[in-house]
């Protein structure tokens, strides 16, 4: 029996139940890992509340991201062995001291990446990787608007975009968060609770506006995000922290400058093993070189997962959050 955090019914943070569960031997194509750190992400709250349906039904072990050491290897697994240090992003099962994992979704970690870093960056860091390099290719001279610039994806994306030569504008909720965003590559910050962020973007850019908006907030920042874009600009909605964007009139994109809009997910960008490994290795390279740092600003014991969710949803966290079994 191993410690885990399960959801027996969907709802608020109180439905996260700390209990012991049985973990069997790895099956065909699986590995068993002892976990040293588990990532906490906003997507975990979507599964917990039922906004995203659980692919395994109820009950389920919460969490989508973690890092640990392989302790057993199932039949048919040839490229991962006992003792390997691995990290992963998969739907559900992460909030546990041990777990089974499809070997095809496990990525070997280089020696210079810690378990804590990996658990704090695999989902957020690989998301930043594809957003900046594939969804919209950011390069020198690009102007980027990042909502929630002091959040988990925000601090990684701001650093990476700055490394690529972009001018980075970020929205934040407080002066403290503005300082965090600036320390992580943000050139200009906008206090969205006090300032009209579209007007501030116009002022900062001298009316030229942004090439791309990265929006993990959702309902509260739409459709005003479209007013921050130049003609033919890209609106990239990758999260729904304030609730999902409701159906909108696609003619808005025409009226606001023949804009592009997309709702990407890591699941599609890293669907193949080759894309997964490429994305993870690029992330490992950037972090290993020091170009991107992973601030793990909140660490909770596994049993305190409920508190971690309360703080995350209350916008009381910055950077990455992890649970330690």
Image (cartoon, rainbow, N blue to C red):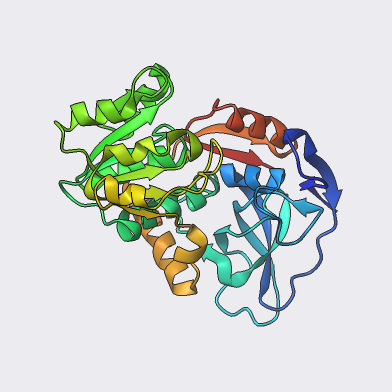
| Residue pictured at 40% horizontal, 39% vertical | 223
Is 235 above or below relative to 16? below
Total of numbered circles in the picture?
Answer: 0
In which quadrant is the C terminus drawn? top right
The part of the image, by quadrant, that contains residue 210 is: top left
| Residue pictured at 33% horizontal, 41% vertical | 226
* Residue 155 visible to an observer of this rendering: yes
The part of the image, by quadrant, that contains residue 187 is: top left
Q: On the picture, is 54 further left or further right than 222?
A: right
| Residue pictured at 48% horizontal, 73% vertical | 272
Is 241 above or below relative to 125? above
Q: Position of residue 285 (x, y in %)?
A: 35, 56
Q: Position of residue 301 (x, y in %)?
A: 69, 35
Residue nearer the viewer, 101 or 197:
197
Q: Position of residue 134 (x, y in %)?
A: 33, 61
Q: On the picture, is 27 further left or further right than 183?
A: right
Single out the residue that lies furthest toward the bottom. 76
Is 264 above or below relative to 12? below
* Residue 41 visible to an observer of this rendering: no
Q: On the picture, is 70 further left or further right than 141?
A: right
| Residue pictured at 41% horizontal, 62% vertical | 279
Residue nearer the viewer, 239 or 160:
239
In which quadrant is the N terminus drawn? bottom right
Residue nearer the viewer, 282 or 208:
208
The part of the image, by quadrant, that contains residue 302 is: top right
Q: On the picture, is 267 further left or further right than 232?
A: right
């Amino acid at each position: 029996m191993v410690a885990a955090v399960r959801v027996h019914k969907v709802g608020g943070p109180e439905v996260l139940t700390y209990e012991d569960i049985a973990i069997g031997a790895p099956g065909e194509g699986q590995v068993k890992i002892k976990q040293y750190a588990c990532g906490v992400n906003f997507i975990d709250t979507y599964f917990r509340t039922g906004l995203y349906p659980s692919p395994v039904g109820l009950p389920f072990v919460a969490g989508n991201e973690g890092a640990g050491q392989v302790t057993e290897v199932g039949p048919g697994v040839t490229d991962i062995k006992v003792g390997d240090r691995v990290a992963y992003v998969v739907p559900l099962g992460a909030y546990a001291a041990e777990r089974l994992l499809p070997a095809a979704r496990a990525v070997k970690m280089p020696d210079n990446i810690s378990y804590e870093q990996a658990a704090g960056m695999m989902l957020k860091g690989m998301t930043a990787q594809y957003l900046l390099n594939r969804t919209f290719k950011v390069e020198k001279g690009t102007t980027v608007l990042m909502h929630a610039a002091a959040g988990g994806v925000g601090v990684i994306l701001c650093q990476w975009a700055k490394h690529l030569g972009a001018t980075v504008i970020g929205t934040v909720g407080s002066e403290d968060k503005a300082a965090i965003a600036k320390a992580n590559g943000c050139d200009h910050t906008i206090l969205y609770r006090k300032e009209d962020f579209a007007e501030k973007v116009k002022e900062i850019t001298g009316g030229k506006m942004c090439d791309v908006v990265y929006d993990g907030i959702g309902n509260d920042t739409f459709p005003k995000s479209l007013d921050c874009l130049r003609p033919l600009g890209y609106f990239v909605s990758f999260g729904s922290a304030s609730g999902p964007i409701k159906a909108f009139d696609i003619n808005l994109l025409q009226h606001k400058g023949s804009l592009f809009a997309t709702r990407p997910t890591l699941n599609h960008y890293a669907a193949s093993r080759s894309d997964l490994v490429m994305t993870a290795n690029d992330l490992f390279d950037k972090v290993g070189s020091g170009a991107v740092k992973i601030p793990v600003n909140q660490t909770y014991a596994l049993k305190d997962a409920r508190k971690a969710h309360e703080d995350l949803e209350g916008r009381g966290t910055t950077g990455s959050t992890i649970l330690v079994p």
